[in-house]
Image (cartoon, rainbow, N blue to C red):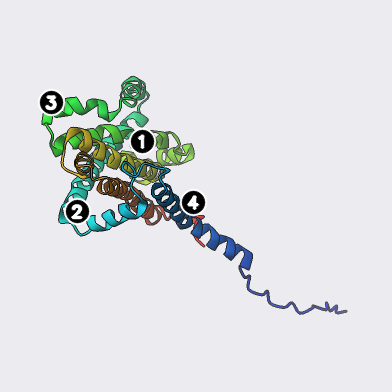
Amino acid sequence: MTSSVALKPVAPAAPRQRPSRVRRRFALHRLLGPATILAVFGLWEISSRSGLLPQAAIPPASQVLAAFGAQLVEPHFWLSVWGTLSVALLGLLIIAAIATPLALLIGASREVQESTWFPIEFLKPIPPVALIPLGLLLWGPTPGMKLFLVVFGAIWPLLTQLVYGFKEIDGVARDMARSYRLGKWLTITRVIIPSILPFGATGLRVSASIAVVIAVVAEMIGGVAGLGQDIVVAQSANAMPQMYALIFAAGLLGLLVNAAFRAAEKPLLFWHPSQRKDLP
């Protein structure tokens, strides 16, 4: 006795297409940022031209943008940008060299963690600006003073993130490393560093933005060459469009540094779930 089962042909599933509503919403979302910037500049221009804002103190946006365009062809402007950026990047290298082994030491030993808790919590709230007199006494108005302030003020986000990441290491992974007797070097390179790397990337990105801010402030108050000193010189000469153009350049520099570190996170952390979920 044989039995037959009638199978109905199943049509192949049509390729899933993205709804046009979602595409329109995505395009609108991408346009919100530039539209907001244009609206702010338009409101600024109208307020200054109409006298709502004092034009002597806040010139129209068109004059500031024209002054910013003129700065872009000045060699001195790029020397100032490099003076600010180079010290901020060098400070980040020193910060990474100090914070990484220190975080490993703090995370690996409960005694070290408890003994360093108070000094770290005491030093973190001290604003770097308060140490400018000390920096001027030790190094004078030099890049060394600026570098000292950058390292002191921007190390805390990275150090805090690394210590927090060390505490979040999966206990199962540690037990497996111990069971397989990987040794200290293999445990650090195969278990600890991959686990704390996402936390370190976030901390380094925050530290980078803070480093640029501290470098500009140190130049403004400490008189070191860079964008901050140029802002003070322009304000002293009553060149207000140039002053706002340089402030705009400092903000743009911080934004670009943050964007560069954020872009570097994806290829560096391609294996991490926080980056995989962004893939189409």
Label 2 to label 1: alpha-carbon separation? 29 Å
Answer whether labels 2 and 4 touch (C-beta < 8 Å): no
Crowding at dot 2, Cα within 10 Å, few <14 / some 14-19 / many 20+, comes out as some
- Which residue carries the number 3 mark? 137
Label 4 to label 3: alpha-carbon separation? 48 Å
N-term-proximal mark, 2 vs 3:
2
Q: Secondary structure at mark 1?
A: helix
Which residue is at 88% across, 79% downward?
1
Above or below — where is 1 with respect to 158?
A: below
Q: Position of residue 227 (x, y in %)?
A: 22, 45
Above or below — where is 81 with respect to 164?
A: below
- Which residue carries the number 4 mark? 273
* Tag 1: amino acid: Pro
- Which residue carries the number 2 mark? 78
* Tag 4: amino acid: Pro
Q: Quadrant of residue 243?
A: top left
- Which residue carries the number 1 mark? 157
N-term-proximal mark, 1 vs 3:
3
N-term-proximal mark, 4 vs 3:
3
* Image side of residue 179 versus residue 64, left or right: right
Which residue is at 29% across, 57% downward?
66
Label 1 to label 3: alpha-carbon separation? 27 Å
Q: Nearer the viewer, mark 1 or mark 3?
A: 3
Q: Nearer the viewer, mark 2 or mark 1?
A: 2
Crowding at dot 3, Cα within 10 Å, few <14 / some 14-19 / many 20+, comes out as few
